[in-house]
Amino acid sequence: MTTRAPWPTASYRLQLQPAFTLADAEAAVPYLAGLGVSHLHLSPLLEAAPGSTHGYDTVDHGRISEQLGGERALRSLAAAARAHGLGLIADVVPNHMAVPVPERLNSPLWHVLRDGPGSPYARWFDIDWAAQGGRVLLPLLGDRLGAVLELGELKVDQDTLRYYDHVLPLRPGTAGLPLPELLRRQHYRLAWWRLADQELNYRRFFTINDLIALRVEDPEVFAATHGVLLRLRAEGVLDGFRVDHPDGLADPAGYLARLAAASGGAYTVVEKILTGTERLPADWACAGTTGYDALRYVDGVLTDGAGARRLAALYAEYTGVRGGAAQAARVGRAELVAGELAAEVSRLVRLAGRIGAAEVELADFSPEAVREALRELLAHYTVYRPYWHATERTVTTPADARQFVELLTQGHLGSSPAKDEFRARFAQTAAAVAAKGVEDTAFYRYHPLLSLNEVGGDPAHPGVEPADFHDWCCWLEQHWPHTMTALSTHDTKRSADARARLAVLAELPERWVEECTAWSALAGGLADRNAEWLLWQTLVAAWPIPPERLVGVLLKSLREAKQATRWTAPDPAYEAAVTDYARRVLAMPELVHRIDGFMAFLEPFAQSNSLSAALLHLTLPGVPDLYQGSELPLHTLVDPDNRAVVDFGAPATGEFARRKLHLTRTALGLRPSLGPYRALAADPHLVAFRRGPEVTVLAPRLPYARATRAEPLRCELAGRWRDLLSETEFTGAVTGAALLVREA
């Protein structure tokens, strides 16, 4: 048996699902151990909704998912992992659980629906009972209630109420009542699904009605929802945790402190999205983030910022889309606040009214004025959410509703249970606005270079200078040395290799627009030029791509943009025009031949970017987390495209695959012995640094520009060095990309 590392040196993310169970993960252990990782990073383990392919829709916190093989299979995996020197990191989902179909699968929620606010489980869920007269809104009807009743679609079945596959509990003693009276007497109000955005009175995960929020700030709820995972940690089955969506929690710092105490200080990272220069709160009891900040810096240093800005200007000419990334983000936020997240804003308005009613100095701000102030503040917020600390009251009477709201969010109107709740709920709402208004709206509307529009990305400021990259690496090593770093995840919109291809376009913006123009002419053109630009870059990212994969990604992208079509109001004619055009493109031999030619030209530069990104990821400070399959070429797109089952028995075919796999194994093998990070002066087309005195990393950048210059890359290094990637030896200077160890 091999000894496990006390802290991870590298992890490997596995997406568990009915098609890839814990037994399948166990079968992959020898291969994954051979890569050189120290831990397996498992997607959520607790029982999820039937058929779940991701596990974030928990229905039962009391058991390991039987769909994945149950606790026995998890223990078997842990034993096999231990035998190969590997530990297990488990994904924890504290923010929410599923509203499943049938509803009885979620036993705590079933009890709340049956017994209402008096249920012992009512404290589990974040429900504003007063907003619906003591009932919880269930927006699951396909039409208005009257139409549903007229069609006879609601059926009483003993002590349950059925609506197609939905099965709901009846309040005791109401089963024999006439149906209209029976509905009025329940602790829930059945409603048309379109009412959710305006009237929903339970917090949810972003805008997903099927995921109801939990109140893990309550110690009893924390204990009940974390008991199984903490027991498995205490028994040595699990070694650490990845915390999903901490920004949804009322008190992330308090939650992490409780988790650290309950788990004995287990290795824990958080899915905290940092924007711009934002830093992880220093008082959080965790090892760091899940790594989207690393993705932004690695991608950034390999992207030509000036070229990306030039590409944005050409994109505006080609598509007619104006305004820029920052404006698109503000508009996306504003639309979400007024639309899909209006119910969350209304809850804040009601809470502000209670605060005003309790203090005469804060009275008489009209609900509409407060609502408008909240909309304005949320639309212009620059980070995911604030984290407040206790402050003294600095203002007695706000001048207007805007100041009232701003001071409440900042804590400058003092503290009370209602004021503290307002601050927490504002923070939770701000996170949802950022995720849905920016990443899931603006990023699908404004996209000069798709590789910039990634989770935690900042497309308004493309590119990172090597000096800034080095500064960030040094800061990371000093403050969060065990943080996770990532390039591809189950949530990235495009995998690292797909983004590496797209990044080359920033180096040749004019050439790219020439190709777009030629492709459009051959295909006959599309009326929506922005959708056409999206199509062309999607082809580059994932070429070659079959029609069904391409159409699925395009439809999701266009619906998320919420302009010509959307999930809640699809436009069949528009969607058919775009998808038919995409299919026609792939069926035109002349155009396919031209795309093949461009991709053949692009591929050497894309592969250079891919290998540099992998080399940086695996050698910079922190704990690199490899997404399943990413040790080989991986050109996947937004989910569900990026969550397919990986065949771990498939060989590495092709020179690029062999080079990437060799680089991955070699770099991972060095990780336990890497020393302190020190930046090296280098050619502008190199990112160079030391990891202790014996290891030097040289990663090329901007490969197209590099290929057009006469002189080769060169880095001066005293002494003799051996490149572990090519087995070449150097004395005094190194040319090209390399992972070097000092020779005696």
Image (spheres, rainbow, N blue to C red):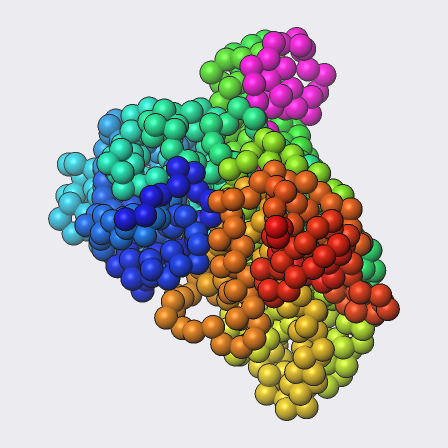
Span colored in magenta: 383-412
Q: Residue at horizontal 36%, vertical 24%?
A: 261
Please indicate, yes or no, whether residue 715 appears anywhere in the rendered image. yes
Q: Is residue 122 left or right of residue 679?
A: left
Q: Is residue 133 above or below residue 501?
A: above
Taking the view exactly as shown, the residue that stands out farthest to the right is: 710
Q: Residue at horizontal 51%, vertical 65%?
A: 661
Q: Residue at horizontal 54%, vertical 13%?
A: 415
Query: Which residue is more in the foreground, 98 or 618?
Result: 618
Q: Is residue 401 covered in magenta?
A: yes
Q: Is residue 382 covered in magenta?
A: no
Taking the view exactly as shown, the residue that stands out farthest to the bottom is: 589
Q: Residue 43, image x and y in percent?
A: 38, 50
Total labels: the figure holds 0
Q: Residue at horizontal 70%, vertical 69%?
A: 605
Query: Which residue is more in the foreground, 308 or 732?
Result: 732
Q: Is residue 521 above or below residue 355?
A: below
Q: Is residue 105 above or below residue 424?
A: below
Q: Is residue 726 above or below residue 110?
A: below
Q: Residue 23, image x and y in percent?
A: 26, 59
